[in-house]
Image (cartoon, helix red, strand yellow):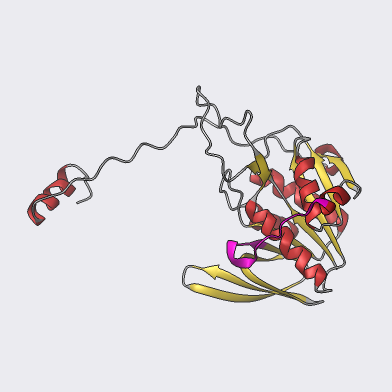
Amino acid sequence: MKVIVAVKRVVDFNVKVRPKTDGSDVELANAKMSMNPFDEIAVEEAVRLKEAGKVTEIVAVSMGVKACEETLRTALAMGADRAVHVETDAVLEPLAVAKLLKAVAEKEQPQLLILGKQAIDDDANQVGQMTAALLGWAQGTFASKVGLSSENVQVMREVDGGLETVTLNLPAVVTTDLRLNEPRFVKLPNIMAAKKKPLDKLTTADLGVDVTPRLTLVNVAEPAKRQAGVKVANVAELVAKLKSEAKVL
């Protein structure tokens, strides 16, 4: 069974991002970049499924600038067998990524596509669902446990009311949540071995996908600073402030 794992290069989760001085975008100059944490979980789950003998090949896929190769090499060091890089300098919106993933999936013919439930840079939580819709595949989102057989995948997913378990016929799309697993520490020998694993290059033109942005970024600004709280003497004063200042009553 072949599995595709989609990974995204994002600003490292330890970095506090700032908007540019002109408010045109987020300042990325000299910022440390790494694999999206939710996608790390996706790679780890694919590797565990392979170690359990349920998966034969793991293909890591990423879209974006040349530097995305570093992210793919990390996925290879974690245990992916080979990688596909769709190289483009364009700003990729979720729908464009979903279309590219669809094209790669049609080319590779996997039985399962795993990716993080969202990326920590835009928090859109859209690509998995869009990709499943475009492919016409079943989807299991926010997975906290995955069980795989030759014909279906069982996904325990986190919902508002607790946990829900769904059984999906293959092929299917699964998006990973934080509690699914803890990604392994990548050892130096694996990093060195990853340099020899195959990494294929494609372009958006090769896949026949138009990635022209549909949205315009108007402005990026930090949220307003939270104001200090105040103490009130009694309930009457509290109600008065809620009416006159907070305007929630």
* Residue 229 sits in quarter: top left
Q: Position of residue 195 (x, y in %)?
A: 87, 46
Question: At 65% from the left edge and 61% from the top edge, which residue is drawn?
Answer: 175
* Residue 136 sits in quarter: bottom right
Q: Nearer the viewer, residue 103 or 181?
A: 181
Residue 119 versus residue 144 in the image, above or below: above
- Quarter holding the N terminus is bottom right
The answer to if 22 sits in the magenta stretch is no
- Visible in this render: residue 130? no
Q: Nearer the viewer, residue 90 or 45?
A: 45
Residue 42 versus residue 202 in the image, above or below: below
Q: Nearer the viewer, residue 171 or 148?
A: 148
> Magenta span covers which residues?
175-188
Q: Nearer the viewer, residue 25 or 129?
A: 25
Q: Position of residue 200 (x, y in %)?
A: 89, 45
Could you tell whether 71 is left or right of 243 in the image? right
Could you tell whether 17 is left or right of 224 in the image? right
Could you tell whether 128 is left or right of 113 in the image? left
